[in-house]
Image (cartoon, coloured by chain):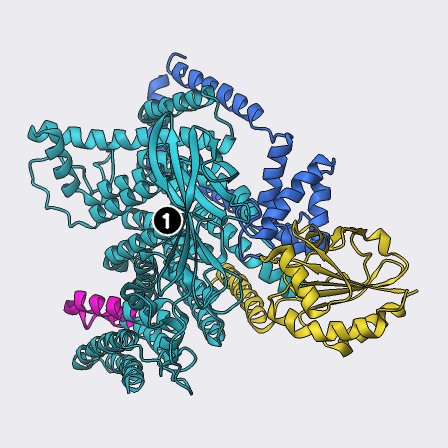
């Protein structure tokens, strides 16, 4: 029991700290935080490969301002995203949707990792279940004799 | 070769071939043209004209509207300017038709645009889009971009790039066809 | 005339490759040793040809020979010397030339290194494969990617390099190092194919390519870190990694290459994971070609993309042929590749490396899926979709955290099997280091689960590594009664692989902590200032002092001077800028960065003074970014240490043993 004490204490410390961190890290619904999140999810329509958060192009700056106006007007995150998709097309959103072909993007690596881990786990179990030494008939005799002698 | 190996190898080979096909197709094709606005209701927007008047999308309902995003320095804009002038000369008097030019990405500012309008004899309504709100509403990524809205508020035709007079007429015709 | 000489050199290179393959092939088939020895000479000829072509190109660039299209497109009369030199690889055709030069260099060196084994079929096959790749790249230059193509009308002045490529001296380092990394992996690939073909896929070929693989990996790592640094210091968007398709293309072979470097240890020790190792090295090479393809085929939109050309088809065809060929070879030999040995216990170093492989492969799959997904959508559904940071962060961060965990735990696990008791004893102190760090960081108010966990695991890993290092050095001190520094140096020389690896891991931990801090806790603001006005961001006060305009033949630069103060101390005047080049309308922003131990102050010029003389500045405070580059440097140092030859062990000293432990005894630390 005493051997496990340092580890139990450790797990307790970690659990508490993680718990606090989780509660503290919930996505804030403060307007500025929402705006920043949305900025990172949309790509700049006239630049190559910069998000709205990163780009200094006039369109990007205008979109940053527009996002804040829309949040102030009470629009939800989904509505704001949809407004930009309506104007510029699907390509403005920097992550695949959770439907149709988007599922392939999100699901494929997860399936591969989980599947791979499962295969490894099964293989490991199979291998460690195999006895490393196989008892021969002579070994069994020795054991049987010893048992008999012990009982007598 | 055991069966398991053969199946595994064929599966991996299939993935490689599919990936190769996908990449090859992409090398061939130009990126898909944006679906655009045709057939959809025009987005709501608001601009202030050089005369200080405020125009919104709602104000334009009931008429055929041609919106042209442009500025004074982009080469295709300069190229299509005569076509637009000719169109305005031909149809500008029609009360059922409105032409609206929206200036975007103009470092010279409003004063330069006013000089240009006066010098070049631009007769139709011009508005500045300094805060890019109208561009954002329409998803404009460059200039010139031209949209024609039918009287019922749906977008009848669109064009990215310099227009000819004939093309502009065709775009207007598409709007007439819609009630 | 220069064009003719250059093209001739390329033709000679191609011919030498063909002749080399033919001679070596004939030598193998007929069993004639003299043919085999002769065949090797063609490798040197190919290298000379590539070097000659490269020299001619530089000659043409400096001579402003605008009759050659590449020169006309990539240098102007006003281009400074450094950027004239780097123009050789600043566009597509030249980059292929640099690739061919690096490749022939590597192959020549390898041929020289194995000169004593010139008749060994494994070496011969590897040389044939390497020459095949060389032939492909020379062939590209003879046809679609001819660097010496001439123009119909010779222009008066050239266009000059892309503005982004003449803005910073890093252009002299980042691409060549990346290419050395990419190209270096051709050698292990060639040996792997040789091993499969000759049936000698034991540990021999691994030992043959160990150093080359490490060198290639080192260059690739350095190239990637330099690219991140360039992105940060030069491009001015405030970050160092944008999950741009071309950035991802450099990360993919790095991931599989790193997995390979680790996984080979299992094959060396126990003869296991052979299929994994061969597959990883084949995949790494294929991914380097995929990266080359993505950059040069116009398939993806990227800041890095070269101009489009037909080269895409050829690269793709080569890639598919190599990939399918590799699969076929592995399938052919698969049954013999499987080792008889089994992993004995889930709590062993073999099992940890196996999981490591899975995690790296999963990471690579995430990056590959995200990069290729828009192409899939385009091809099958005619839709234009984007994949960027939100996707990659969500998917890759958990994998990165898991890898950090295994990096801490793995080196502590013994081979074969162990008891829970041993693990608990070894990990207790490091685990507490991690737990206390976690508690401290959370108590200080940090937010973000990923960041907080990364810090904790970083401390855990540090402590575990420190423990390994400390035990090893302490054992040496006891045996030899040396001082700490001497003992450390001698211990490292005694087992450079282990110590080099531990130093690299230290670098990785530093990078991981810096990544967590600099991605999670950035402060970003835009401030608009009139002359002599100030603004406050975090603890900094910024005052707009004025604007300067520099005009040179190369470019025009608008610089905005900003005084930075903190807590009453004047930290100096910083000058973010925007430059315009004569042949391009776009302005290139240059950030001004104050690098500090704890954080960077990052200033960009968002818009030059407007009519009212007001200026808009982008202000960012980025924590711990300096440690990203420092960690990269530590990784490079560790790689160098790992490459050192091991000093022969003296009989007396109980050095950390490379040989397996005596039966029944679990050795504290392995190789």
| Visible residue check, residue C334 | no
Magenta region includes residue A63: no
Q: Secondary structure at mark 1?
A: helix
User: Against C397, is C385 above or below?
Assistant: below
User: Against C61, is C600 above or below?
Assistant: above
| Visible residue check, residue C371 | yes
Q: Colour of chain A?
A: blue
Q: Colour of chain C?
A: cyan
Residue C476: image location, x then y, percent = 13, 32
Residue C412: image location, x then y, percent = 31, 33
User: Against B109, is B168 above or below?
Assistant: below
Q: Tell me the subunit letter for badge 1.
A: C
Magenta region includes residue C104: yes
Residue B93: image location, x then y, percent = 87, 69
Name the foreground residue: C588 vs C641: C588
Q: Identify the residue at image location x=40%, y=14%.
A: A5
Residue C42: image location, x then y, percent = 22, 79
Q: Identify the residue at image location x=35%, y=65%.
A: C553
Q: Is residue C371 toward the left or the right of residue C459 in the image?
A: right
Q: Colour of chain B?
A: yellow
Q: Crowdedness of circle 1 by 10 Å Cα count: few (<14), some, many (20+)?
A: many
* Residue corresponding to mark 1: C229
Kindly report the secondary structure that dominates the magenta region of the rendered protein.
Answer: helix
Q: Quadrant of the C terminus of chain C?
A: top left
The part of the chain drawn in magenta is C103-126
Q: Is residue C361 toward the left or the right of residue B69 in the image?
A: left
């Amino acid at each position: 029991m005493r051997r496990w004490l340092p580890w139990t204490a450790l797990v307790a410390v970690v659990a508490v700290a993680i718990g606090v961190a989780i509660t503290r890290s919930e996505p804030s619904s403060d307007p500025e935080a929402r705006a920043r999140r949305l900025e990172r999810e949309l790509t700049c329509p006239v630049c190559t490969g910069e998000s709205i958060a990163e780009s200094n192009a006039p369109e990007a700056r205008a979109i940053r301002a527009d996002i804040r106006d829309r949040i102030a007007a009470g629009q939800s995150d989904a509505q704001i995203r949809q407004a930009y998709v309506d104007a510029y097309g699907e390509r403005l959103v920097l992550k695949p949707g959770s439907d149709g072909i988007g599922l392939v993007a999100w699901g494929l690596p997860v399936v591969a990792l989980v599947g791979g881990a499962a295969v490894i786990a099964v293989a490991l179990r199979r291998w460690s279940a195999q006895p490393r030494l196989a008892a021969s008939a002579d070994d069994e005799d020795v054991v049987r004799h010893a048992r008999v002698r012990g009982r007598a | 070769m055991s069966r398991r190996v053969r199946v595994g190898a064929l599966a991996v080979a299939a993935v490689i071939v599919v990936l190769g096909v996908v990449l090859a197709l992409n090398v061939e094709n130009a990126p898909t043209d944006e679906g655009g606005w045709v057939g959809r209701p025009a987005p709501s927007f608001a601009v202030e004209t050089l005369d200080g008047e405020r125009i919104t999308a709602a104000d334009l309902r009931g008429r055929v509207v041609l919106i042209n995003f442009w500025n004074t320095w982009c080469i295709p804009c300069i190229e299509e300017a005569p076509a637009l002038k000719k169109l305005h000369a031909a149809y500008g008097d029609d009360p059922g038709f409105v032409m609206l030019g929206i200036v975007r990405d103009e470092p010279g500012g409003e004063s330069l645009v006013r000089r240009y309008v006066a010098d070049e004899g631009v007769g139709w309504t011009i508005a500045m889009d300094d805060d890019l709100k109208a561009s954002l509403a329409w998803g404009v990524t460059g200039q010139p971009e031209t949209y024609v809205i039918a009287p019922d508020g749906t977008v009848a035709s669109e064009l990215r790039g310099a227009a000819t007079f004939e093309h502009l007429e065709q775009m207007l015709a598409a709007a007439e066809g819609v009630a | 005339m220069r064009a003719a000489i250059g093209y001739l050199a390329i033709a000679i290179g191609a011919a030498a490759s063909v002749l080399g393959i033919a001679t070596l092939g004939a030598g193998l088939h007929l069993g004639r040793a003299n043919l085999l020895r002769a065949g090797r000479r063609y490798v040197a000829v190919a290298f000379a040809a590539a070097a000659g072509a490269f020299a001619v190109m530089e000659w043409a660039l400096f001579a402003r020979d605008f009759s050659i299209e590449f020169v006309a497109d990539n240098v102007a009369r006003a281009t400074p010397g450094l950027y004239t030199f780097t123009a050789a690889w600043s566009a597509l055709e030249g980059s292929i030339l640099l690739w061919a030069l690096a490749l022939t260099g590597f192959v020549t060196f390898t041929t020289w290194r194995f000169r004593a084994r010139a008749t060994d079929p494994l070496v011969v096959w590897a040389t044939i494969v390497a020459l095949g790749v060389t032939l492909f790249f020379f062939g590209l230059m003879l046809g679609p990617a001819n660097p010496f193509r001439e123009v119909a009308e010779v222009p008066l002045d050239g266009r000059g390099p892309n503005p982004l490529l003449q803005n910073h001296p890093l252009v002299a380092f980042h691409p060549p190092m990346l290419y050395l990394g990419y190209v270096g992996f051709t050698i292990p690939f060639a040996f792997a194919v040789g091993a499969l073909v000759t049936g000698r896929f034991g540990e021999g070929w691994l030992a043959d390519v160990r150093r080359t693989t490490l060198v290639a990996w080192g260059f690739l790592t350095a190239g990637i870190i330099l690219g991140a640094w360039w992105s940060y210091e030069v491009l001015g968007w405030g970050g160092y990694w944008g999950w741009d398709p071309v950035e991802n293309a450099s990360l993919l072979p790095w991931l599989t290459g790193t997995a390979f470097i680790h996984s080979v240890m299992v094959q060396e020790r126990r003869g296991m994971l052979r299929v994994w190792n061969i597959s990883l090295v084949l995949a790494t090479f294929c991914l380097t070609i995929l990266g080359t393809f993505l950059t040069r085929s116009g398939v993806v939109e990227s800041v890095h993309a070269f101009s489009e050309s037909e080269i895409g088809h050829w690269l793709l065809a080569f890639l598919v042929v190599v990939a399918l060929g590799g699969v076929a070879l592995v399938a052919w030999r698969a049954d013999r590749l499987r080792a008889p040995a089994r992993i004995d216990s889930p709590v062993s170093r073999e099992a940890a490396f196996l999981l490591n492989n899975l995690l790296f492969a999963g990471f690579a799959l995430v990056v590959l899926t995200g990069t290729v997904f828009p192409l899939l959508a385009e091809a099958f559904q005619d839709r234009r979709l984007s994949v960027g940071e939100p996707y990659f962060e969500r998917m890759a961060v958990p994998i990165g955290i898991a890898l950090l965990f295994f990096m801490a735990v793995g080196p502590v696990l013994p081979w074969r099997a162990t008891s829970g008791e041993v693990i608990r004893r070894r990990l207790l102190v490091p685990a507490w280091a991690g737990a206390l760090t976690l508690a401290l960081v959370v108590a200080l108010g940090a937010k973000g689960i990923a960041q907080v966990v990364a810090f904790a695991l970083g401390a855990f890993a540090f402590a575990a590594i420190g423990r390994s290092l400390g035990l090893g050095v302490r054992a040496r001190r006891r045996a030899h009664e040396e001082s700490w520094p001497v003992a450390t140096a001698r211990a490292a020389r005694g087992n450079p692989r282990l110590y080099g690896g531990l130093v690299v891991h230290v670098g990785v931990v530093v990078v991981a902590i810096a990544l967590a801090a600099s991605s999670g806790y950035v402060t970003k603001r835009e401030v608009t200032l009139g002359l002599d006005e100030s603004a406050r961001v975090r603890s900094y006060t910024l005052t707009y002092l004025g604007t300067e305009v520099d005009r040179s033949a190369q470019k025009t630069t608008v610089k905005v001077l900003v005084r930075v103060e903190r807590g009453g101390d004047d930290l100096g005047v910083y000058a973010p800028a925007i430059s315009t080049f004569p042949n391009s309308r776009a302005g290139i922003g240059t950030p001004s960065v104050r690098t500090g131990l704890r954080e960077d102050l990052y200033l960009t010029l968002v818009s030059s003074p407007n009519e009212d003389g007001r200026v808009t500045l982008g202000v960012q405070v980025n924590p711990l970014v300096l440690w990203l580059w420092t960690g990269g440097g530590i990784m490079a140092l560790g790689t160098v240490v790992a490459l050192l030859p091991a000093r022969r062990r003296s009989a007396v000293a109980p050095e950390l043993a490379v040989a397996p432990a005596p039966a029944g005894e679990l050795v504290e630390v392995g190789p």
